[in-house]
Image: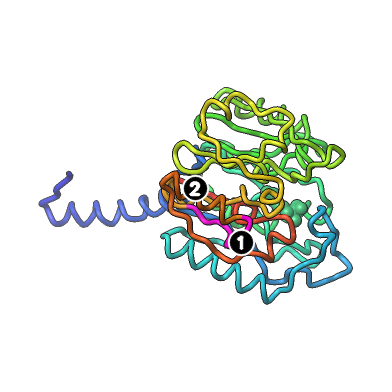
Amino acid sequence: MLIITNPIIGLIFAVRKAPLDSIELIKTIKQYSETHTLQKVIIGRYENYSEAPAYVELVNEDQKNGLPQKEQLKEEFDTFRQVLTEAGVEVLVPDYVGKFVYDQLTPRDLGMVIGEKFLLCNMVKKSRRYESAGIFRYLHDIPGHEANIIIPDSPTCFIEGGDILVDKGNIFVAVSQRTNQEGVAFLEEQFGSEFNVVPVEARTLAEGENVLHLDCMFNPVGGRAALIYEEGFKQVPREILDNYDLIRVNKEQQRELATNILSLSQDRIISRDHSLCKPINEEIRKAGIDVVEIKFDAAPATGGSFRCCSLPLRRG
Ligand SMILES: NC(=O)NCCC[C@H](N)C(=O)O
C-alpha cells in the first residue's frame, strides 16, 4: 500500500491520479472472455423504432410474423437497463441515426471488442448498413496511440458481431446468413497471431435451420459451461467439444433464442422469462450460476434477445 505523509505531495498525487484512473475505467475497451464481469455496455435503442414505415426492411424470418409495438419495447428495455445498472454496469444507448435505419434494437452486430481492439463490422442488410453511425460517439472516446479500431478492407467482406465470440483464447466465428468466408479470413489476418480463430459453419435456411448468427446456437456461461444448439452446426469444432460442459438446447427452445443470454459475470446471467427458456435457465442454475429472468418478448420477435440487444465495450 502507498502511504503519502507529506500533505502537499499527497494533494498533487490525488489530483493527478484521479483523472488518469477515470480515463482508465471509463474509456478503455477490453474483452477476452464472454463471461468476465461486464463493466460497460451499449444496449439497443427502442426510441424511434420503426417510425417511418416506408423504410422498414424485413431482414429475417422472425420479422415476417409481425413487428412489436413501441410501448412493449420501452417497458422491456427499461427493465433490462435497470437490471444492468443495478449490477453496476455502465449503460450507453446509440444515438438516433435517421428514419432510414428503422431498427436500432440489436447493436451486437455492429461491432465487437476483441482483446483491446474494436472491430467495426460491414453489415449485409441495407437498413442496417449505416446503423453503426449511432455508436460513433462511443468509438471516438476510445484512447490509444495505435489504430485500435479495425475496419474491413473490402465492401464484400461481411461480418457481424453476433457471429463472433471471444473465449478461452479462441475467437469463434460463424459463416452464417450474415458472415462470409471473406469475413473469417479478415479475422484470421487481423487477430490470428493473438487468438486461435475457430471457424464454424452454420446450417442454412435451405437445410431447414434458421440460425441467424452464432449466438443463436452457441454461448458460453460461467467458467466452464456453454449453451449449444447442435443441429445448427454443420460440425461442432473440437475447441467447443473439449473445452465446455455443454447444455443442449432443442429446436423449439432455439427458436425462442434460449442460447442468446447475456453474461453479467461468471456467476450471473440475464435470460428470458419464457416457458421454453425456463428449462434451460434451470440447467444453468444447476451449474451454480444465478439466472436473472426478465420478460423480454418484443425484441426476440425482431430476431434478437439479450446478447443481440447488447454490445459490451468492457469486461474485466
Ligand atoms: N446477434 C443476433 O442474432 N442479432 C439479431 C439481429 C436481429 C436483427 N433484426 C437482424 O436481423 O439483423
Q: Is residue 301 above or below residue 1?
A: below
Give the residue at x 14% y 48%: 3
- Indicate left or right for 283 with 251 as reference: left
Q: Regarding mark 1 in the picture, which secondary structure is present there?
A: loop
Quarter occupied by the C terminus: top left
Q: Is residue 271 found inside the magenta-colored segment of the image?
A: yes
Image coords of residue 138 (percent x, y): 58, 55
Q: Which mark is residue 284?
A: 2
- Indicate left or right for 255 with 283 as reference: right
Kind of residue at badge 1:
His
Give the residue at x 68% y 55%: 256
Quarter occupied by the N terminus: top left
Q: Which residue position holds label 1?
A: 274
Kind of residue at badge 2:
Ile
- Note whether residue 109 is visible: no
Stretch in magenta: 269-276
- Note whether residue 25 is visible: yes
- Indicate left or right for 4 with 230 as reference: left
